[in-house]
Amino acid sequence: MNSISRRRFLKISGATIAATAAVTSLSTVTKGAKAINEKTGNSEKGIRKVPTYCSMCFWKCGAIGYVRDGKLWKVEGNPEDPLSQGRLCPRGTGGVGAHYDPDRLKYPLLRKKARGEEKWVRVTWDEAFDFIAKKMKKIKSEYGPESMALFSHGIGGGFIKHLMKAYGTRNIAAPSFDQCLGPRETAFELTFGDVVGGPERTDIENAKCIVLVGSHIGENMHNTQVQEFSKAVEKGASIIVVDPRKSTAATKAKYYLPIKPGTDLALLLTWINILISENLYDKEYIKKYAFGFEQLKAEVSRYTPEWAYSVTGIEPDLIRKTAREMARYRPNTLVHPGRHSVWYGDDTQRARALAILSALLGSWFRKGGLTNQDIFDIPAYPYPPYPKFNKPKADNPNKSKWPFGGAEGYTTGLREATITGKPYPIKGWFVYGTNLIYSLPNVKETIKAIQKLDLLVVIDVIPSEIAGWADVVLPEAIYLERYDELFHPYFKQPFVSLRQPVVDPPHEQKPGWWIAKKLGEKLGLQKYFPWKNIEEYLDTRLKAAGLSLKLLKEVGVVKGPKIPLYIEEGAVPEFNTPTGKIELYSTELSEKGFDPIPKFTPPEEPPAGYFRLLFGRAPMHSFSRTQTNRNLMNIMDENELWINPVMAQRFGVKTGDYVRLKNQDGVLSNKIKVKATERIRMDCVYMVHGFGHNSRMLKEAYLKGASDTNLITKYKIDPLMGGTGMNINFVTIETEA
Ligand SMILES: Nc1nc2c(c(=O)[nH]1)N[C@H]1C(S)=C(S)[C@@H](COP(=O)(O)OP(=O)(O)OC[C@H]3O[C@@H](n4cnc5c(=O)[nH]c(N)nc54)[C@H](O)[C@@H]3O)O[C@H]1N2
Ligand SMILES: Nc1nc2c(c(=O)[nH]1)N[C@H]1C(S)=C(S)[C@@H](COP(=O)(O)OP(=O)(O)OC[C@H]3O[C@@H](n4cnc5c(=O)[nH]c(N)nc54)[C@H](O)[C@@H]3O)O[C@H]1N2
Ligand code: SF4
Ligand SMILES: [Mo]
């Protein structure tokens, strides 16, 4: 997680769940180990079961790897794990394909020709480290250590982060903040004084009414959420889905609102107005916990359903009905806060409206709403302190660009600093587990920044597009072949889980911790790597929490005691905002000159003959990382272009035809297959993100489908927190002449 809230900082410093009390009793734990064997069938001869956690996406479900006759056979859910509850999603099951992928990176590679030409020589690890260490030392002496930046996504990057901090830089960023959930976390922190967190604090399972504004659960396959959503649907929860495209979730909805893209804030403010003007909100809750109700009431009174109809295209009657439906089930109504929230550049304000709506429904710390969360406290490894970081961070110097959020860094801020050399030059990039060519908007800018570098190191598992631009490519062992950092997130059921190797890496691939330690030693930073090996590191941390590596290796996951989740169960909400209350009116926004209560401004319209380009997820793929996985490509090997049949006809295309898209800046896409469907509005088209690879070494994926990122040349930055709104690009259809 990239945005630790103020409240969570406080909690981390004052130990939360006392370590010794954490393990409910050892007998429960051994029962856990026994249960793994019982629930997964008795151990057969020649079969080994190794508990670990999944990394096919960032949800990190507890899993069990099966080894048969010394070979990786299958991966299933760990029944003891609170995230997977014994079941993996299609990508988790397909994870086996990542181990057997013939296109994997096998050895360290050194660039032979110009950057981006993908010509390499195979080198030894020692040669690769010597090359990198020499360049890093030079950058340090010429510019200072701050001139190295790290882009990293996922828990695996933890040891590389440690290496970079030990080297002396804090210029670290991940696309999971300013290309993902940044606006949401910033908005909830401004409103409730705490973040939503990941895994989210959404009590989907117990909700009687669920409102999904764009969140396409079911295509967005975050396992626990999907399982809970199915249970809620089975129990008859009333589902309200707002999406310009009839998503899988929308097919389960009682009310589906095919909204005009970019106008959600108008709908949300109108819902808020109805709850207030019809006296449907939770008066007691608001009186007790909230600040700024009268200002809110006055501000939203102008957003009538009739007005909203003209803006959103949603009938006034449907707007009223759905507002009443939410109120009917409150406080057991869940307005899902969303996750990927960088849409139009005013995203923090939209997410603020979601937060305010949740407050009016009284659902923070209520059953079926947004629950309390806590962490299984595992003390950090006792490292020596890092060297002082003397310069301001390069991405957002002293918060001068964006006053809120982003404690850990901005990818596009670092990219810009690299291009401009301001506030100081950035000369080296380390890239761990993020395909920047796919995850950052405006590829040209990314390449421009890369051209300014003296060193680009990429640690990846496959020859991704970003690896194609590297000076040195380091092949990491995949998650089923390595130890990693312990996983102990804030969650409604605190727990800790272990990633451990199920099988060996097939070639010269090495784990991240090993890469960090060896390179650290070459850089003279051995005092920051005092542990002999990862087992010693993990055991030290676990022992400090009253556990041990031996135990975790056996059971995979240990749960802490249950915590009160709702006010009714004794959970006490504390709002770490300036007023100590839920800020319907944000004092912090007002102080910094932003709208203290969200205001709607209409988005720019597509030019004639153009559609708004929308994008999202498919259940069997993760971003741009799974298209070379044979198991998953067998299920879906290209993305499709969703287009309304009326518009398809107007352009003379039909389902199955291949077309290219051209965006407002004249950029042309790869070929993509048409899917003409009533399930999308006429003013937009939709595709799944992550396809259309142009790295030749990704043989299975090369030029299959189209890349949304290539068409995302424009982005709109959220002035509050620097998120890059990407739903503002327009495309037209080019048929093959
Ligand atoms: N156009 C567009 N841009 C987006 C999005 C979108 O939908 N459309 N989504 C945004 C969102 S929500 C997010 S969270 C980000 C995600 O952004 P990224 O995390 O950059 O996503 P991926 O494209 O999966 O790139 C991950 C890279 O890590 C590599 N990798 C996989 N496993 C390992 C491993 O074990 N070790 C190492 N070292 N590398 C590994 C993969 O091969 C791949 O090259 O993208 C954001 N950017
Ligand atoms: N299978 C799979 N699951 C994943 C991932 C993955 O790569 N693969 N990635 C995970 C990650 S890191 C993230 S952040 C999440 C992202 O998933 P979510 O947070 O659920 O969704 P988004 O990507 O924001 O939005 C995509 C949906 O929003 C709709 N939409 C587009 N524009 C608008 C609009 O203006 N208004 C409204 N109301 N809806 C709109 C689209 O039609 C689509 O249904 O998915 C997670 N789950
Ligand atoms: S949601 Fe799926 S891919 Fe993600 S960690 Fe869980 S099983 Fe793995
Ligand atoms: Mo994300």
Image (cartoon, helix red, strand yellow):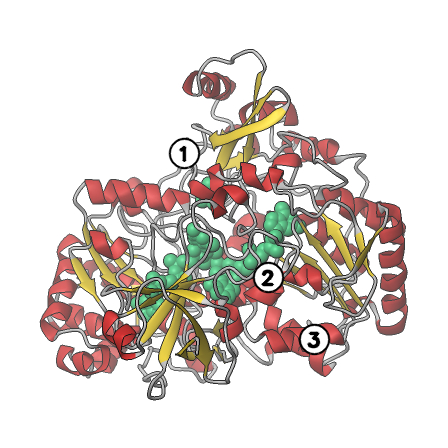
Pick whichever, 173 or 87, lies toward us.
Answer: 87
Give the side of residue 719 with respect to residue 347, left or right: right
Pick whichever, 300 or 312, lies toward us.
Answer: 312
Q: Amino acid at mark 1?
A: Arg
**Disc 3 designates what residue?**
449
> Which residue is pictured at 58% across the width and 34% down the height?
498
Q: How far apart, in angstroms, are the residues tagged by discs 1 and 3?
A: 42 Å
Tell me residue 658's x, y (percent).
41, 67
Q: Would residue 22 be seen by someone viewing this image from the given angle?
A: no
Of badges 2 and 3, the one in the foreground is 3
How many residues crowd mark 1 within 10 Å: few (<14), some (14–19), many (20+)?
many
- Contact, mark 1 vs mark 3 (Cβ under 8 Å): no
* Rendered view: 488 above or below 21: below
Dot 2 beta carbon under 8 Å from ligand 1? yes
**Disc 2 designates what residue?**
174
Of badges 2 and 1, the one in the foreground is 1
Mark sitting earlier along the chain (2/1):
1
Q: Give the quadrant of residue 339.
A: bottom left
How many residues crowd mark 3 within 10 Å: few (<14), some (14–19), many (20+)?
many
Mark sitting earlier along the chain (1/3):
1
Give the side of residue 271 with respect to residue 426, left or right: left
- Contact, mark 2 vs mark 1 (Cβ under 8 Å): no
- Contact, mark 2 vs mark 3 (Cβ under 8 Å): no
Q: How far apart, in angstroms, are the residues tagged by discs 2 and 1?
A: 28 Å
Give the side of residue 73 with respect to residue 425, left or right: left
Pick whichever, 425 or 26, lies toward us.
Answer: 425
Give the side of residue 210 with respect to residue 116, left or right: left
Tell me residue 726's x, y (percent).
46, 73
**Disc 1 designates what residue?**
87
Element type at mark 1:
loop
Mark sitting earlier along the chain (2/3):
2
